[in-house]
Amino acid sequence: MQTLSAQNARIKIDVDRTIGEVDKNIYGNFVEHLGRCVYGGIYEENSPLSDENGIRLDVLDAVKELNVSITRYPGGNFVSNYNWKDGIGPKDDRPARMELAWSRLESNRFGTDEFMAYAKRMGTEPYFSVNMGTGTIKEAQEWVEYCNVKSGPYYAELRKKNGHEDPYNIKYWSLGNEMDGFWQMGHLNAEDYSKKAREAAKLMKLTSPEIKLIAAGSSNYRPNADPNEWNEKVLHELRDVIDYLALHMYVGNVENNYYNFVSSPLVLEERTRVVKGLIDREMQNADRGNRPPIYIAWDEYNIWYRARGEETMAGTKALEERYNLEDALVISGFLNAFIRNADIVKMANMAQLVNVIAPIFTSEKGMFKQTIFYPIQLFANNVKGTSLDVHVDCETYDTGKFFIGLGESTTIQKDVPFLDVSATYNNGEVIVCVMNRNKDKAITTDLLCQEGIFDGEFEVYEINGPDIKSENDFGKTSVETKKKSSLKVKKSDKITYDFPAHSFTMIKGSIVK
């Protein structure tokens, strides 16, 4: 462990040292036909808690608090054996199908049109994933036609016949899900995936030229996999075609080692830097016209390890993870990492929205907000503008070798700062986000303004709990956001604050230049 001298820890903030603009789409989420995410989550027909369309109103109110910018649908592993045509038209006429990814029966009573109605009520941008597994490139084109073409061709007219006169104009489409994974139905190698994705993209763009396309980057970081080889090949083959490369990562406290666990978002940051380098190389020879370079979409990330055994991975109650305070801290670390890499990470989707590894958990009688709800809510409703390249000077620690999560690779993290920090600046307002990894003690810290001065009232919000294992439940909220006493600052270049042990803190106020 590196120990500082008697001086306080320091966070230096310079509004002239910028990283990039924070994209609102890093505050995305994900709805998959998996377990109780859709049925019994956002949608529950004949429930006293639902409206006449089957929408759970208590869940919808909580979802709106998260200010979800973009929502991915309908999978996930589910999409690789999904035919979107099964989920349109009169509900009673839709076919029930064997759902092979998660071993359940899919009624198809919730599909494209129901999701679009829900997305409108959420106030979120839709992001659809096409079936690149068992599906054909023609199916993908026809779905774009159904959603985005105003009138004329068969599927546009079918949408109108189904009661939806205006096109949905869905902008974001991913070319399959986790196609590098051997577990994926219709799994392909990088060469074959690139060929299929390129041709699907061609048909989709001919149908709706303005759409943005996301390719399936690597999700397989198992010890015997070569994720960088996959990413390299896909980027090389699709560098003129796609707009984003999707990456996935799940972490977990498999060995019950707190300090290892709260360092795991740094691995996401390492992977981001590697892929950024691969993108930079391909952009040198890409023919993209006036389009921006390819960006990274972390369109699946979360903590998932408790509900990952045979008995918890299938059926109607699959992946029902219960979260505690240390999980909320790790989520704040992921969000800090996205902010620190705002130049390249332009989309992120927490998986998932309700019940399935989710911030919201329901029963037939009600719901509660899990611990991870609160950092997402704070970031999505506050952190925007320009990401700043802050300098952090604090004590550090080293981890031993540990597994990042189940079915994941190992890492050793050196010089992990006890204070994990991001900051943004927007029209004179600075927001500093600090996770104190220290389990046992507060860290007295000087926030130093390098350009301009702090001035006025600074709001302070804190996420904490009695213990790192503290959980929320029905009727019990142990971990939540609390507004602390404001800091009154009169034209000073320094604010001193004690960041409590095992906490996340957001400080929000003005810099006068």
Image (tube, grey):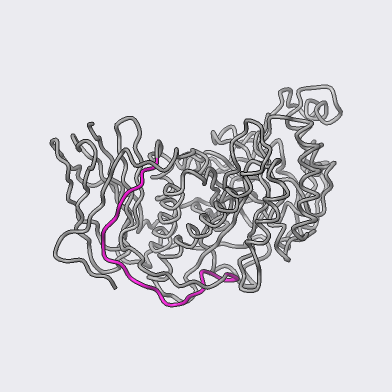
Q: Position of residue 450 (x, y in %)?
A: 23, 42
Q: Nearer the viewer, residue 167 or 186?
A: 186
Residue 266: quadrant of the picture:
bottom left
Q: Position of residue 188 (x, y in %)?
A: 78, 59
- Name the residue: 27% across, 63% down: 501
Residue 231: quadrant of the picture:
bottom right
Q: Nearer the viewer, residue 229 or 112?
A: 229
Q: Nearer the viewer, residue 115 or 242?
A: 242
Does residue 66 appear to the left or right of 424 in the view shown?
right
Q: Position of residue 240 (x, y in %)?
A: 70, 41
**As displayed, is residue 443 above or below residue 112?**
below
Classify the position of the N terminus by image quarter: bottom left
**As displayed, is residue 393 above or below residue 508?**
below
Residue 311 painted magenta = no
Does residue 307 appear to the left or right of 146 in the view shown?
left
- Name the residue: 55% across, 51% down: 276
Residue 425: quadrant of the picture:
top left
Magenta segment range? 387-408
Classify the position of the C terminus by image quarter: top left
- Name the residue: 65% across, 35% down: 116
Does residue 296 appear to the left or right of 326 in the view shown?
right
Q: Nearer the viewer, residue 101 or 35?
A: 101
Q: Position of residue 267 (x, y in %)?
A: 48, 63
Q: Is residue 369 visible?
A: no
